[in-house]
Image: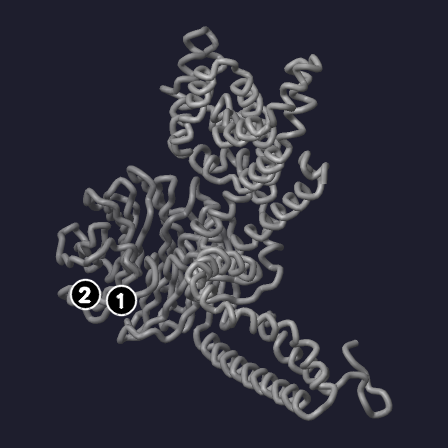
Amino acid sequence: MLWRLRGGTTDLAPAQVLLVLLCCFLLPTPLLAQQEAGLLWQVQSDGRLSAIAVAGDGSRTALGGRDNLVRFVDQSGAELWRFAAENSILGLDITDDGAWVAVASEDRFVYLLDAATDAAARLQWQFKTGKPANHVALADDGSLVAATSDDLSLYALAGDGTLLWQEPLGIDVRAVAIYGTGDKARVVVGSDDGLLSIYSHDGRRLLQTQLDYAIEAVAVRPNGARILVGTRDGTVSLLNGSNGELLWRFKGTDTIQSVALTRDGKLALAGAEDGTVYLLDEAGTVQQRFDQRESVLAVALNGDGRQLALGTIGGQGRFYDRDVALVDAQGRVQQRRLTVGLSTGLVLLLAAVGTWAVRTTTVGQQVWTTRTARPRTLLQEIWRARFSYLLILPTLLLLLTFNYYPAFSGLYHAFTDWSPGIKSEWVGFANFHLLLENRFFLSGFRNAGILIVVSIVRTLTVPLLVAELIFNLRNRFAQYWTRTLFIVPIVLPLVVEILLWNNIYDPTIGLLNKTLEAVGLGAWARVWYGDANVALASIIFIGFPWVNAFALLIFYGGLINISDEVIDASKVDGASTWRRFWRIDLPLVMGQIKLLLILNFINAVQTFELVFLTTGGGPGAATYTPALELYYSAMRMNRFGVASAIGMVLFVIIMIGTIINMRFVQSATEYEA
């Protein structure tokens, strides 16, 4: 209970009551948990959802993705049937009446499915291409199927699955569409060289148009009058189908990966890699935006454009009613404006009450005098030294901009659904809940724990022993050159060292396997990074014999700083080298050990480049680390909020380790104090 009435009055002061009211208006704003505007249903797939197609009346939708499945659902999202290929589904198309579905799969097959009944899909035929089939298009009467493949070719297939013709394009191609029926059917294809071509039913090239960038997606009206093109630079272009003339162009924020067009060509839909879906009118103006949390791989429209579907890299298949979405969006804008207006009014009211209390009441003046004394004194001191502060202002601004702002931004965005430059929606602990369900992230902590222990042990042992060896050399010349030989490798970048070890571990020409074969131990040879039993150990072994040059310098500096009187006294007392190491050297380099302990702990928790450049986290999750999942979440899946949450978890772990190190690891100087 925040407050209660008692005898007609409250237990709280007026200012406190106003603060409570302010919180009531402010707190719900970022915590709105309403259903996404216009979302009718959604389907979750295992892995990316890279293909989607909608029948003309919106009553049937086909979805395909990395789980090798084609799901056929009705207008409520209920699954009618599913078809399993041998590998990922990369392309889908459906006839206007929803009776036929064409499928392009990474298993190198193009499939035609009879979807006329809701009971099950009947495979009509399958055709094998040279390499994975990456996209497919289907004529509305099912008489022509066109497919593109990673073998750099375009295939045209008859309704019975026979090959009509094949066009070797010699360049990557993944954008294809068909308009017309029967012998009048035409194939529209776009390639990575920016060339848009139209082919007749018998394979004759009828038209070519050159665009500025690689073509990622095409869509076309049923009569071929308008062609919609999405390119790698983030541009959506509408072309005249008869002569290739540009009608309008829209520039998005990232690569356009999929496009769709209504039957009358008055509405266009485009999905971008940054998760933005644009609904454009016949003039190329944005009518609506559907911002997703991750990259959008596929989009589709029904015939009149009232309903739209999209598939994301995270496996989400979503179906929207755009009219409902528009109404919901307008209502939310009004609600947001009302909340902002009320909040602003309450803030101003609180400010006015506070000002009135300070100026007219004894209590207010007393509080102002006592509470602001120290800040006012500090401001006066700063003003007296204003020239000095002015000189350090540039440095301070640079630190705030490039060090502190990114850090605090990451902590804040750990609680948001964040797409930089697009949206930042407060989601509370939702990102952390996702991490608890992420098996890669959780399994990465085991590997990170092993790497932390190994890193600390080998950094605090081998460099210290080598430093002792150099320190105890009696010949100054030998001491100098031995020290130099161990320090020289510090000029070699870590990346070069890792790539060198990659060659050593190479399963075919690598030095390690070749050496084993030469000494008669060929049975021990293996794919070192590909065997889950030895992959992590192989990574740990990189850098053998682990003489870290930085740690060596730190330890050597600590040893030469030990007073000669102490060393001489130990010799007079007859202490052996081993006894002197334990009783004198080790306690006096505890400061260096403390420093290296925390530095290696931080570095091991953040282990990324070592795993990224060797195994990429594989095989499976055998070498996965939390820092690697942070990178993949941000850079490959565009889940910047989740990546920030991972960063916050690592920050907490590092902070706890730092506190423990400062509290329990003490140097000899600290003992004396």
Q: Splitting the image into 4 quarters, where does residue 559 fall?
A: top right
**Any part of residue 319 in sight:** no
Instruction: Find residue 510 and report its image quarter.
Output: top left
Picture residue at 26% right of the left edge, 40% below the top: 151
- Residue, disc 1: 221
Mark 1, secondary structure of its residue: loop
Residue 439 locus on image (x, y percent) = 59, 44
Please tell me whether residue 603 is drawn above or below residue 570 in the rendered image: below
Query: x, y (%) of residue 59?
Result: 45, 66
Look at label 1 and name its amino acid: Arg
Q: Name the residue under label 2.
A: 241
First in sequence, mark 1 or 2: give its number: 1
Q: Can residue 647 be seen in this view?
A: yes
The quadrant the C terminus occupies is top right
Mark 2: which secondary structure? loop
Q: Which mark is residue 205?
A: none
Residue 93 image point, x, y percent: 36, 56
Q: Which of 281 and 43 is in front in this view?
A: 281
Q: CB under 8 Å between callouts 1 and 2? A: yes
Q: Residue at x 47, y 81 (%)?
A: 330
Q: What residue type is labelled 2?
A: Gly
Direction from residue 207 to residue 215 in the image, left or right:
right
Way the structure is coloured: one colour
Query: In the picture provided, is 51 more to the left or to the right than 661?
Result: left
Residue 325 vertical placement versus 438 (above, below): below
